[in-house]
Image (cartoon, helix red, strand yellow):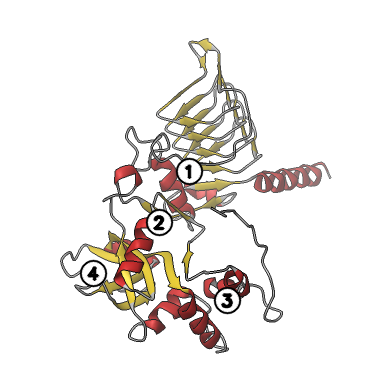
Amino acid sequence: MGEGVHIIPAQQRIGENWYRGTADAIYQNLDLIKSQTATERILILGGDHIYKMDYSRMINFHVESGADVTVACIQKPIEQASEFGVMGLNEQGDIINFVEKPKNPTPMPNDNSKALISMGIYIFNVDVLDAELRQALENPDYKHDFGHNIIPSLIGRSNLKGYVFTERGHPGGNGYWRDVGHVDEYYAATMDLLAPTPELDLYDTSWPIMTNQVQRPGVKFLFNDPNRRGFAVDSVLCAGAIISGGQVNHSLVSSDVRVEDFAEVQDSILLPRSIVGRSCKLKKVIVGEECIIPDGTVIGYNLEEDKKRYTVTEDGVVLVSAEMFEAKQEVDANSDIEALA
């Protein structure tokens, strides 16, 4: 069918600026889009979202409705809506208003507890997108963003439709979607995967997630002594992980992770090739790739102390990285030298 995947590096095609926003990123690659023969429509996706969606249904909606632009949208609690573009639709599905990250979001007409927000997924007719980008981005005060500029400016001038993303007909049988541009949302999305019946089911064989995985051996659990037992419950563990006399509870353990003797890991995310040392205690922690947690380290039980050493989010998630521990070790070493002096 002539399908393929092309990875296009960032470019500076219209001056000395790198991409100044989502709209500018498309603008600087318009020549590549238009070089494809018989390209009438373009589907634009965000790179920091987690969901399952059958795009063909949205494309069919776009074509059948005669839209120039279609914006995917989903219902979200009103208290979360300020983080997104909030939109309103009329009975015909036309977008009649759109405000990016409003301080006081407008609720849905039939439900004051929710707002209709943009998912950052768009379908444009290429001729409409081409004309709008070329005209709009000549303005030096432009914010170069679809949500701030392009979509609001097209209301009343083009046929804009809202495609409401629901569970109907989509893989997984639900309308699950999260924007993981913030650490707290990334953490929440990961914790969602650990539910007995997760909204986003990685084990769904009818709509599998295709990815490239390095071949690694299976997960290994070591020791079964009364005070030294390696186990994991309510968790997801990836290939190559070794739980050596430690305890893992309600956590995600990535590939090639080691949890050493007497360590306790609770409500946490351990990224690839990280090591949790002996007798460590971690709670609600994201451990970065190749990060080695020294023996006896306690994180997540005293957030005020954690803030002095690590990154702590608004929701109390502690983010630690290899660089943080390297910096801490350097400070400790300098303190030892000063003490000796």
Q: Could you tell which of marks 3 and 4 lies nearer the N-terminus?
A: 3
Q: In terms of depth relative to the viewer, which is nearer, 300 or 123?
A: 123
Q: Residues within 10 Å of mark 2 (few under 14, many from 20)?
A: few
- Outermost residue toward the left in this view: 110
Mark whose residue sits in front, 1 or 2: 2
From mark 1 to mark 2, how far is it between C-alphas? 45 Å
Mark whose residue sits in front, 3 or 4: 3
Residue at the disc numbered 2: 55
Q: Residues within 10 Å of mark 1 (few under 14, many from 20)?
A: few
Query: x, y percentage for residue 60?
Result: 35, 62
* Amino acid at dot 1: Asn
Q: In terms of depth relative to the viewer, which is nearer, 341 or 235?
A: 235
* Amino acid at dot 4: Pro
* Amino acid at dot 2: Tyr
**Do the numbered discs 1 and 2 sit on residues whose CB atoms are within 8 Å?**
no
Residue at the disc numbered 1: 302
Residue at the disc numbered 4: 107
Q: Could you tell which of marks 3 and 2 lies nearer the N-terminus?
A: 3
